[in-house]
Image (cartoon, rainbow, N blue to C red):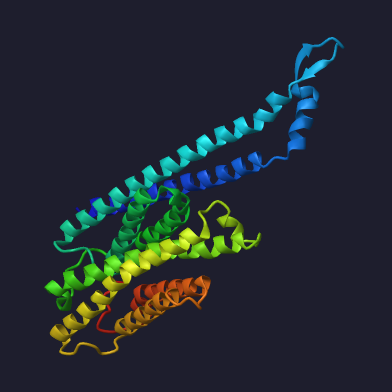
């Protein structure tokens, strides 16, 4: 069962990679179509008047008859074909993302059966679960707001990086739970922290996209703002960022409180400034600061969004940095 789980996750990584490539094709074709539609009118007339733009028919003067209408519609026709290909590339990308998520879930379920517990006992399992929550939440968002599909390029990129890192760097053979984790609070605390972290993972994607798109709308044409040319409007991306964080923050708050209750039962104290506890508190403060800034009219939206990105960096620090560089009561990374 463990070998089957590993195979499922490996195949899911490849499928996410194919989905990312399909999204990239959609993105590129969208740029091609935009350039074709924006072709200057005098170029179309010139193409129509050229020898290659004639019908070859004769008129009374013996000259060829320029078909301005055909030449003028050639570019729109080509643009329509390009748009059709881009549409199908996007649909294929979404289908591959759904397939990747199904394989990802199958890998988690089989891993849990092989371990005889919920698959959240070490860093490898935690990263796999958080990344699955992120992609599952993305598919729910896409079901309700399909116009956000071009964000899939960035989401699948994050999925490929996270799941590949879990497989190649963080992989840990199945072992029994650490005795301190063998409690019903394990399910309560870890399930909520995983769910909130997965939503924070998804929330950082439109946050970064918003900053790039807002810069592009302000006239910036340098890298990385040009990457946002085909993205939805900045205002919509910013609202999506807020909605995801406003939904996940109370869950994260409950997870921190549940962890304190569990710590009281397991170690006889609710809070001891263990490295993970400290960084969880830092994350909570930063995300609370983001929501406060977002609700304050005098704070610019891009400033508030940078706080959301900073919050996710603290989550990454808690997930990777604390497990790798610090020792404490929460040292269950398995590395």
Q: Quadrant of the C terminus?
A: bottom left
> Is 22 located above or below residue 120 in the figure?
above
Residue 92 relative to residue 232: left or right: left
Residue 335 relative to residue 236: left or right: left
Q: Nearer the viewer, residue 244 or 155?
A: 244
Q: Nearer the viewer, residue 20 or 311?
A: 311
Residue 250 relative to residue 210: left or right: left
Q: Residue at position x 59%, y 64% from top?
A: 215
Q: Residue at position x 43%, y 50% from top?
A: 17
Q: Residue at position x 29%, y 83% from top?
A: 277
Residue 6 position, x and y percent, is 28, 54
- Residue 333 shows in this picture: no
Q: Residue furthest front?
A: 297
- Residue 228 shows in this picture: yes
Q: Residue at position x 41%, y 72% from top?
A: 312
Residue 27 position, x and y percent, is 53, 47
User: In which quarter of the view is residue 81 placed?
Assistant: top right
Q: Nearer the viewer, residue 66 or 207?
A: 66
> Is 170 located above or below residue 106 in the figure?
below
Residue 110 position, x and y percent, is 20, 54
């Amino acid at each position: 069962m463990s070998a089957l789980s590993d195979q499922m996750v490996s195949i899911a990584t490849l499928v996410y990679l194919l989905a990312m490539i399909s999204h990239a094709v959609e993105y590129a074709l969208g740029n091609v179509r935009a350039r074709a539609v924006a072709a200057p009118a005098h170029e179309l007339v010139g193409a129509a008047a050229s020898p290659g733009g004639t019908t070859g028919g004769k008129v009374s003067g013996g000259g060829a008859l320029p078909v301005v209408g055909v030449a003028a519609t050639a570019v729109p026709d080509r643009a329509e074909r390009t748009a059709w290909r881009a549409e199908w590339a996007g649909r294929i990308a979404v289908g591959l993302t759904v397939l990747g998520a199904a394989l990802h879930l199958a890998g988690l379920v089989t891993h849990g059966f092989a371990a005889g517990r919920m698959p959240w006992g070490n860093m490898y399992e935690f990263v796999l679960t958080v990344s699955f929550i992120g992609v599952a939440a993305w598919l729910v968002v896409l079901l309700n707001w399909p116009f956000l599909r071009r964000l899939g390029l960035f989401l699948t990129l994050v999925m490929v990086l996270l799941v590949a890192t879990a497989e190649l760097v963080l992989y840990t053979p199945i072992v029994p739970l650490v005795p301190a984790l063998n409690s019903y609070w394990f399910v309560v605390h870890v399930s909520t922290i995983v769910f909130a972290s997965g939503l924070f993972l998804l929330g950082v994607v439109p946050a970064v996209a918003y900053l790039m798109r807002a810069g592009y709308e302000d006239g910036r044409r340098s890298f990385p703002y040009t990457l946002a040319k085909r993205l939805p409007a900045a205002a919509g991306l910013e609202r999506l960022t807020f909605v995801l964080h406003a939904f996940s923050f109370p869950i994260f708050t409950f997870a921190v409180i549940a962890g304190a209750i569990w710590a009281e039962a397991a170690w006889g104290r609710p809070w001891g400034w263990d490295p993970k506890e400290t960084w969880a508190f830092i994350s909570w403060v930063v995300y609370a600061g983001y929501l406060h800034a977002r609700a304050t009219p005098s704070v610019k939206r891009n400033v508030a969004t940078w706080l959301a990105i900073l919050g996710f960096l603290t989550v990454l620090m808690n997930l990777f940095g604390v497990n790798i560089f610090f020792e404490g009561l929460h040292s269950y990374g398995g590395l």
